[in-house]
C-alpha cells in the first residue's frame, strides 16, 4: 500500500476566492482590520510577557482612501512581519498564522483575543482589488519587506525603506469595486463591523470644539482643533465586569448601540461565562408592543468584538430574539450552515445558558422588587409567555414569577391565584375555574356580573395567551380557563346559587317551549332556564368555551386546516333567569303578539350586550326601540 499527499495547485485559486470565498464582498475590510487588530494585540501580548522589547504605547489602526490613486490603505502599528514570515503566512494560502500563534503561546494567549482562524481572511482583499501590496516591518531587528501581487499566483518580494514598526496593506481597488473608494461607504462599513473592536481605528480627521479661554468676548467663536476621527469604542460595556458598571453605563451603552431608540430599556442582563464555553454580552428588555412583527433592532452577534451578524437565530432561544443587545463568543462556529448550527452541541449549550440566565434575572427582579416587576409586566409579558410556551425548562422557572393580572389591576402568581379562588370558583368536579376577560370594554357587562358574584376576573389580553392557557390546562391538575362570557360561568353560578325558582315545573315547560317557538328552531341558541337572583339579567348569552377557542384558532390560522372544513357553526346558550320580573311577565302575557315582541326585544338586548347584534338586525332593533320610547 502507498500513501501520498494530494498537491493542490493554486494556479486558479484567485478567481475562486473572488467568486466564492465570501458571498459578501464588503467583509474584506473587516478581515483586514481584524488582521491589523491581531497584529497589535499580539505585540501587546509579547511585550507583556517580555518577549518583545518594545514600547507598546497607544497604537492605532488607520484606514485611508486615496481616490485619485484608486487605493485603500490599512495601516497598523502591530508586530509586523519578517521576510520569512511573509513567505510563510501570506504565500501559503490557508496557512493561518493566528492559529499557529495560539498553538505556540497556548495558555498565555488564550485571553489575548486573537480573531483570525481560517487563514483565508487576507486573501479576501482580492475580492475587491486587482493588486495588493504589503509593506511591513517586524518588531524584530530585520529589514522591512515589500510584497506585491497582482492577483495571479505570482508575487514579488523586495526590501523596503519603511522605518516604523507595523504593516501597511495597500489595495488597488478593481474597476468593479470602486464603491469602496467612497468615504461614506467606508465609514458605513467601519461602523457596521468595527464599531466595538479593541484597537482604536482612525478614519480621517474631525474638528473638535475647545472651551473658550477665560475672558473671551461673547461674539468670539470658540477655538477648534483638528483631531483623529476615531470610529470605534475599543472598550464596550459588555467586555467589562458587571461590578465595574453602573446602571447609567448600561443605559449609555444601549444608546450607543441603538441611537434611534428613544425609549430606555426596562432592564438588562449581563452575560458572562468562561466555562464550558466563552460568552459575554448584555441583553436588554425593551418595551415591547403586542405587535410581534415590529422588531427592527436586533441582537448583534460578535466574535472577539468583531461584528458578525444580527441574525442570531439558532444561537439565542427563539423567544428571546425580541430582546436587544449583544452577545460575543469565540466559540460559535460561523463557517457552517444555520441548520448545522442548531444541532451543534456547544451552540445548544449557549442557547440554554442564555435562557437560564434570563429566567434567573426575571426571578430576582420579581423577588427583590415585586411592585416594580408588576409595573413592567405588561411590557415584558409577551416574552415570558412565549418562553413558557416554547421551552419547558423556562416554563418551570417562570411558573413561579409569571403574573396574572386581574381586570382591577391586582397581580397574582399562579399559585396565589389558585389559593385565592379555591373557595368560590370550584365546579362540581372539584375543578378550579379561572375566569378571564380578553377585552374589558366589549365584555364589560359579563365582567360586572362575575364580579357581583364575588369572582376574580383576570385580564388576559396578549396575542398568544390562548395557547398558554391551553398549556396550563394540560400541565396543571384540575384547572380550566373560562372567559367571562363562556358557558362555564353558569356552571359555577349553578353550584353557588341555592336559589329556588319562582316558577313551577309546569310553568317552566311552557316558558321554554314558547321561547323556543319565537327564537325559532333554526337559530343557534339553546334555551336554558336557570334560577338566579332577581337582580341578575333576565337573558344572558354564553358561548361554549371550546367553541370560541376553536373559532379563534381558525381566525389565526391554527385550526382551519385541522378540520378541513369551512367556518365553525355558531353555537350559543341563552340563559333565561326564571326569577327575573320580566321573565315572569313574558310568561303571563296573554296576547301572542306582545309576548313575541317582549321575547325579541329581550333577546336583542342580550345579543347587544355580547356584541352579537349587527347589520340589519341592529338597524331593526334601533328602529323598534325608538318606536317604543316615543
Ligand atoms: P488568519 O487571520 O485567519 O490567520 P489571514 O489570511 O487573515 O488568516 O492572515 C494570515 C496571516 O498573515 C495572519 O495569521 C498573520 O500571521 C499574517 N498577517 C496578516 N495581516 C497581518 C498584519 N497586518 N500584521 C502582521 N501579520 C499579518
Ligand atoms: Mg485574519
Image (spheres, grey):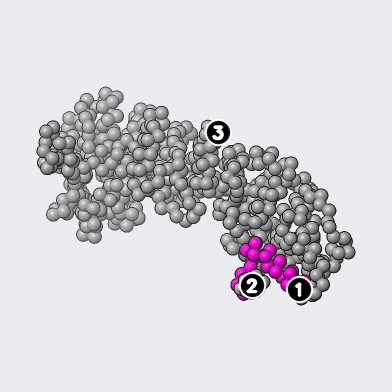
By secondary structure, the bulk of the magenta-drawn segment is best described as helix
Which residue is at the front of the view, 209 or 63? Answer: 209
Please give the name of the residue rendered at 85% of the width and 67% of the height, measured from the top-left corner: 510
Q: Quadrant of the N terminus?
A: top left
Outermost residue toward the top in this view: 50
Check if residue 610 falls in the magenta segment: yes
Which residue is at the front of the view, 401 or 584? Answer: 584
Q: Which of marks 1 and 3 is in front?
A: 1
| Region rendered in magenta | 595-616
N-terminal-most mark, 3 or 2? 3
Please give the name of the residue rendered at 81% of the width and 49% of the height, measured from the top-left corner: 498
Which residue is at the front of the view, 59 or 450? Answer: 450
Residue 405 in which image quadrant: top right
- How far apart marks 2 and 1 lie (CA) works out to 17 Å
Q: Nearer the viewer, mark 3 or mark 2?
A: 2
| Residue on which the image places disc 3 | 367
| Residue on which the image places disc 2 | 630
- The crowd level at tag 3 (other Cα within 10 Å; few <14, some 14-19, many 20+) is few
In the image, residue 390 lies at what x, y percent? 57, 48
Residue 204 in which image quadrant: top left
Q: In this view, does 603 lie to the left or right of 344?
A: right
- For the residues bearing labels 3 and 2, Cβ distance under 8 angstroms: no
Q: Quadrant of the C terminus?
A: bottom right
| Residue on which the image places disc 1 | 594
- Asked which secondary structure carries label 3, the reply is helix
Outermost residue toward the front in this view: 630
Amino acid at each position: 500500500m502507498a500513501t501520498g499527499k494530494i498537491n493542490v495547485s493554486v494556479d486558479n485559486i484567485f478567481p475562486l476566492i473572488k467568486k466564492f470565498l465570501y458571498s459578501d464582498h464588503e467583509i474584506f475590510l473587516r478581515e483586514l482590520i481584524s488582521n491589523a487588530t491581531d497584529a497589535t494585540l499580539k505585540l501587546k501580548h509579547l511585550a507583556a510577557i517580555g518577549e518583545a522589547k518594545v514600547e507598546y504605547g497607544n497604537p492605532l489602526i488607520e484606514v485611508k482612501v486615496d481616490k485619485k490613486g484608486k487605493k485603500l490603505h490599512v495601516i497598523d502599528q502591530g508586530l509586523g512581519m519578517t521576510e520569512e514570515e511573509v513567505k510563510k503566512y501570506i504565500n501559503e494560502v490557508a496557512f493561518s498564522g493566528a492559529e499557529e500563534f495560539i498553538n505556540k503561546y497556548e495558555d498565555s494567549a488564550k485571553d489575548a483575543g486573537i480573531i483570525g482562524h481560517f487563514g483565508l481572511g487576507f486573501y479576501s482583499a482580492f475580492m475587491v482589488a486587482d493588486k495588493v501590496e504589503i509593506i511591513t516591518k517586524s518588531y524584530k531587528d530585520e529589514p522591512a519587506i515589500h510584497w506585491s501581487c497582482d492577483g495571479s499566483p505570482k508575487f514579488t518580494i523586495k526590501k523596503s525603506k519603511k522605518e516604523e514598526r507595523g504593516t501597511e496593506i495597500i489595495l488597488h481597488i478593481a474597476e468593479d469595486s470602486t464603491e469602496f473608494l467612497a468615504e461614506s461607504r467606508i465609514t458605513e462599513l467601519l461602523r457596521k463591523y468595527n464599531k466595538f473592536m479593541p484597537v482604536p481605528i482612525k478614519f480621517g480627521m474631525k474638528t473638535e470644539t475647545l472651551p473658550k479661554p477665560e475672558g473671551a468676548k461673547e461674539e468670539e467663536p470658540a477655538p477648534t482643533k483638528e483631531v483623529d476621527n476615531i470610529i470605534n469604542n475599543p472598550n464596550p460595556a459588555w467586555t467589562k465586569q458587571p461590578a465595574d458598571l453602573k446602571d447609567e453605563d448600561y443605559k449609555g451603552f444601549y444608546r450607543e448601540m441603538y441611537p434611534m431608540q428613544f425609549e430606555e430599556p426596562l432592564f438588562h442582563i449581563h452575560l458572562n461565562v468562561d466555562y464550558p464555553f466563552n460568552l459575554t454580552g448584555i441583553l436588554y428588555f425593551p418595551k415591547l408592543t403586542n405587535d410581534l412583527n415590529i422588531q427592527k433592532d436586533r441582537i448583534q452577534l460578535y466574535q472577539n468584538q468583531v461584528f458578525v451578524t444580527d441574525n442570531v437565530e439558532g444561537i439565542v432561544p427563539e423567544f428571546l430574539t425580541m430582546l436587544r443587545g449583544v452577545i460575543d463568543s469565540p466559540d460559535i462556529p460561523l463557517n457552517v450552515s444555520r441548520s448545522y448550527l442548531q444541532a451543534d452541541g456547544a451552540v445548544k449549550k449557549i442557547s440554554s445558558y442564555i435562557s437560564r440566565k434570563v429566567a434567573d434575572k426575571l426571578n430576582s427582579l420579581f423577588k427583590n422588587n415585586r411592585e416594580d416587576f408588576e409595573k413592567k409586566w405588561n411590557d415584558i409579558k409577551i416574552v415570558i409567555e412565549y418562553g413558557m410556551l416554547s421551552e419547558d425548562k423556562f416554563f418551570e422557572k417562570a411558573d413561579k414569577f409569571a403574573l396574572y393580572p386581574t381586570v382591577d389591576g391586582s397581580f397574582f402568581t399562579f399559585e396565589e391565584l389558585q389559593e385565592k379562588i379555591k373557595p368560590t370558583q370550584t365546579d362540581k368536579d372539584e375543578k378550579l375555574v379561572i375566569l378571564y376577560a380578553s377585552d374589558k370594554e366589549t365584555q364589560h357587562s359579563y365582567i360586572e356580573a362575575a364580579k357581583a358574584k364575588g369572582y376574580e376576573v383576570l385580564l388576559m389580553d396578549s396575542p398568544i395567551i390562548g395557547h398558554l392557557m391551553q398549556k396550563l390546562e394540560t400541565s396543571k391538575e384540575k384547572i380550566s380557563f373560562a372567559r367571562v362570557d363562556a358557558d362555564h360561568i353558569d356552571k359555577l353560578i349553578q353550584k353557588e346559587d341555592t336559589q329556588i325558582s319562582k316558577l313551577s315545573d309546569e310553568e317552566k315547560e311552557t316558558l321554554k317551549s314558547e321561547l323556543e317557538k319565537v327564537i325559532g328552531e333554526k337559530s343557534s341558541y339553546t334555551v336554558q332556564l336557570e334560577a338566579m337572583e332577581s337582580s341578575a339579567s333576565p337573558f344572558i348569552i354564553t358561548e361554549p368555551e371550546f367553541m370560541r377557542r376553536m373559532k379563534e384558532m381558525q381566525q389565526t390560522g391554527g385550526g382551519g386546516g385541522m378540520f378541513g372544513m369551512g367556518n365553525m357553526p355558531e353555537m350559543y346558550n341563552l340563559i333565561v333567569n326564571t326569577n327575573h320580573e320580566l321573565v315572569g311577565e313574558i310568561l303571563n302575557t296573554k296576547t301572542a303578539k306582545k309576548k313575541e315582541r317582549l321575547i325579541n326585544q329581550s333577546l336583542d338586548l342580550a345579543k347587544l350586550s355580547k356584541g352579537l347584534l349587527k347589520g340589519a338586525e341592529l338597524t331593526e332593533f334601533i328602529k323598534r326601540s325608538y318606536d317604543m320610547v316615543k
